[in-house]
């Protein structure tokens, strides 16, 4: 694994500044790229970080910035053009409602004017805490049409996490349905289910109505991703990359009227924005469901067939768990969010066009595309989108030779502005570009890869401790920091065990003074109250001490080996069978096998014992395959105990 020139604590660093006021940390041993002046001479990494935090309080550009505004099209303009051409075609379809492009635009413009009347516009951030559905789509488009940026807040997230995201992003207004998820001083809440007290026109919103003109450099949305320091960080995405995104979708996939795009991903992830734009910037229909209808496995397959989906973006974990027979006939499937394997291509490519996409949140959803991919061929991440570049660089930021692994540095119109309220981190990750125009930046992805002799790109791993878990981006350091902040924990380490569809987090902790009697169970409960479900370890093991390497560091390879051995060892005893007189005991035994734990009790909750959505699908499949019975996947989410679940077992 190549060393990283931006994370060597003993090296000296410069702080560089370009004409737009952006900063970059830069190794002092390397010459400063053109268009960047030295603002702080060679110093320590900590001193350089502290300087950036002091002089660059906001990574978002000020309207009076020296550089001229970009001429790139904003999201509202791109959407308005599609509405003008396809006004009477279906834009969004939920299970109960269908809105034409004209209907959707009218709702968007009315809500945008309501936000403008409340004083919101460019430079502001608005939270959206709304379940999947037409209100969620309307809210996102309306916020950007008003000129503000939206911050998605998943209603299913713990309240503590929602409060952090709302406070960290400095929200002025929160849009919601149901009950306000958070209450903060100075935060105005607006219930989208309540009628608007004032009639508002549905015509297009213009710059004359906004507080100031909307520019491509203005924020479109902020997505929170896992952070290595223990708290999630907000990635600030401007409008500048929207036109390039739409062009890339047209270039590779070519969606249009008559196509039906599944909204699979949550709006809390940038893949959800891809789904929205793939449909609504092309004239296709965005098909909306509830969360349960897109669970990997039979639920997702029924949805894809029953809702006549023609285009779907699905991570490898969903593709692994779902039968492709009869799904997306002649349509398009895009694998993204994790490494796509040849086995997945062999299952999913026949009978449909299949693509493999790559790109982090920091680059407006994506950077490269491969495809259509074909069975039997190596699975690459393809070529950069139009307007994007990928540089494969070594430790001295020199281009690597074909076949030589290096770190992937990403360049393009979709580059994020940085991390909200974290200028030093922004200066470390968005660094001066020695190969681009003077004063330009490149994003240091932390991904490793190489080019072959034909220029095709291949992803080979990570240079840091970030992982992809069932399509979710997780910084293991954030989970460890959350564990070590819990009373009774002195030291913690977290590793990943299992393969694509069974991958899960395993935590190892060394207790401190006066640990709880059931420290492992207590810690999972406390983490569930502050972290998203995908970041809560499925298992916590309490150790007297953590294994160490010869140089005194935690031996994570040994922990990974231990986690893998434990996960691969099923509970002892014969395979459970259904005893009609005691179906609860049989289901508990089968569930223990699926979860890889010693035992599950009648009063236990599936998710409290380490279950997640993919394991819920596997449990339902095991019930069908081993017993010839049916257990609805939805029921696993809706019933509190194993005893309640057992009462729903029915014969096929």
Image (spheres, grey):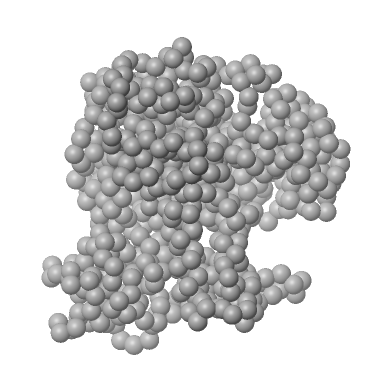
Q: Between 455 and 364, which is closer to the camera in this rendering?
A: 364
As drawn, which residue projects farthest toward the top? Answer: 208
- Can residue 352 be seen in this snapshot? no
As drawn, which residue projects farthest toward the front? Answer: 185
Q: Quadrant where the N terminus lies?
A: bottom right
**In the image, residue 233 lies at what x, y percent?**
57, 46
**In the image, residue 610 lies at what x, y percent?**
41, 69
Which quadrant of the view contains residue 259?
top left
Q: Between 14 and 122, which is closer to the camera in this rendering?
A: 122
**In the image, residue 431 lies at what x, y percent?**
70, 37
Is 506 above or below relative to 326? below
How many tags in the picture?
Answer: 0
Q: Residue at x 45, y 45 (%)?
A: 183
**In the image, residue 592 lies at what x, y percent?**
35, 77
Q: Between 547 and 208, which is closer to the camera in this rendering?
A: 208
As drawn, which residue projects farthest toward the left? Answer: 651
Left or right: 331 with respect to 368?
left
Left or right: 302 with respect to 603?
left
Q: Quadrant where the C terminus lies?
A: bottom left
- Can residue 87 be seen in this snapshot? yes
Q: Residue at x 38, y 21 (%)?
A: 113
Q: Residue at x 39, y 42 (%)?
A: 129
Left or right: 546 with respect to 252?
right
Q: Residue at x 50, y 18 (%)?
A: 211
As drawn, which residue projects farthest toward the bottom? Answer: 573
Left or right: 527 with respect to 279?
right
Q: Between 181 and 233, which is closer to the camera in this rendering?
A: 181
């Amino acid at each position: 694994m190549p060393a990283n020139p931006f994370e060597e604590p003993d090296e000296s660093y410069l702080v560089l500044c370009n004409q737009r006021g952006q900063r970059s940390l830069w190794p002092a041993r390397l010459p400063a790229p053109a268009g960047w002046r030295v603002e702080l001479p060679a110093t320590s990494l900590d001193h350089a970080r502290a300087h950036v935090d002091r002089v660059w309080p906001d990574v978002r550009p000020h309207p009076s910035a020296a550089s001229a505004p970009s001429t790139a099209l904003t999201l509202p303009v791109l959407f308005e053009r599609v509405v003008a051409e396809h006004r009477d075609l279906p834009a969004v379809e939920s299970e109960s409602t269908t809105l034409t492009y004209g209907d959707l635009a009218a709702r968007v413009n009315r809500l945008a004017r309501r936000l403008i009347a409340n004083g919101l516009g460019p430079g502001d951030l608005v939270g959206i805490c709304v379940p999947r559905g037409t209100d969620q789509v309307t809210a996102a488009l309306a916020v950007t049409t008003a000129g503000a940026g939206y911050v998605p807040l998943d209603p299913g997230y713990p309240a503590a996490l929602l409060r952090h995201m709302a406070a960290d992003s400095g929200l002025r207004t929160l849009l919601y349905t149901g009950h306000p998820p958070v209450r903060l001083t100075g935060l105005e809440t607006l219930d989208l289910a309540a009628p608007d007290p004032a009639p508002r026109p549905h015509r297009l919103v213009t710059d004359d109505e906004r507080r100031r003109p909307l520019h491509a450099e203005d924020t479109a949305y902020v997505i929170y991703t896992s952070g290595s320091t223990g708290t999630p960080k907000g990635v600030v995405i401007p409008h500048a990359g929207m036109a390039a995104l739409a062009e890339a979708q047209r270039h590779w996939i070519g969606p249009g009227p008559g196509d039906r795009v599944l909204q699979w991903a949550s709006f809390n992830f940038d893949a959800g924005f891809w789904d929205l734009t793939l449909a609504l910037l092309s004239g296709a229909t965005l098909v909306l469901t509830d969360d349960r209808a897109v669970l990997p496995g039979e639920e997702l397959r029924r949805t894809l067939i029953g809702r006549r989906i023609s285009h779907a973006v699905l991570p490898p974990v969903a593709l692994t768990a779902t039968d492709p027979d009869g799904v997306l006939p002649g349509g398009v499937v895009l694998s993204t969010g994790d490494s796509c394997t040849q086995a997945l291509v062999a299952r999913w490519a026949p009978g449909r066009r299949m693509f493999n996409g790559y790109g982090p949140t920091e680059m407006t959803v994506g950077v490269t595309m491969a495809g259509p991919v074909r069975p039997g061929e190596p699975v690459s991440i393809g070529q950069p989108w139009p307007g994007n570049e990928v540089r494969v660089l070594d430790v001295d930021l020199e281009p690597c030779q074909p076949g030589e692994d290096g770190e992937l540095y990403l360049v393009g119109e979709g580059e994020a502005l940085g991390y909200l309220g974290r200028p030093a981190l922004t200066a470390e990750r968005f660094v001066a570009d020695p190969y681009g125009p003077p004063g330009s930046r490149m994003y240091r992805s932390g991904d490793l890869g190489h080019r072959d002799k034909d220029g095709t790109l291949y992803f080979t791993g990570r240079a840091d401790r970030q992982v992809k878990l069932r399509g979710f981006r997780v910084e293991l350091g954030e989970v460890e920091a959350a564990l070590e902040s819990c009373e009774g924990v002195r030291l913690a380490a977290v590793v990943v065990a299992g393969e694509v569809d069974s991958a899960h987090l395993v935590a190892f902790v060394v207790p401190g003074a006066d640990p709880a009697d059931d420290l492992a169970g207590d810690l999972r409960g406390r983490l569930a109250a502050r972290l998203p479900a995908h970041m809560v370890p499925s298992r916590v093991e309490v150790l007297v001490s953590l294994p160490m390497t010869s140089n005194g560091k935690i031996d994570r390879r040994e922990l990974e080996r231990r986690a893998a051995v434990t996960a691969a060892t099923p509970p002892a005893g014969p395979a459970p069978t259904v005893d009609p007189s005691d179906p609860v005991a049989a289901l508990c035994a089968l569930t223990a096998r699926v979860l890889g734990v010693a035992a599950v009790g009648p009063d236990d909750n599936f998710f409290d014992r380490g279950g997640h959505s993919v394991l819920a699908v596997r449990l339902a499949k095991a019930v069908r395959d081993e017993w010839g019975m049916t257990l609805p996947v939805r029921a696993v989410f809706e019933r509190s105990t194993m005893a309640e679940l057992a009462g729903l077992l029915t014969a096929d």
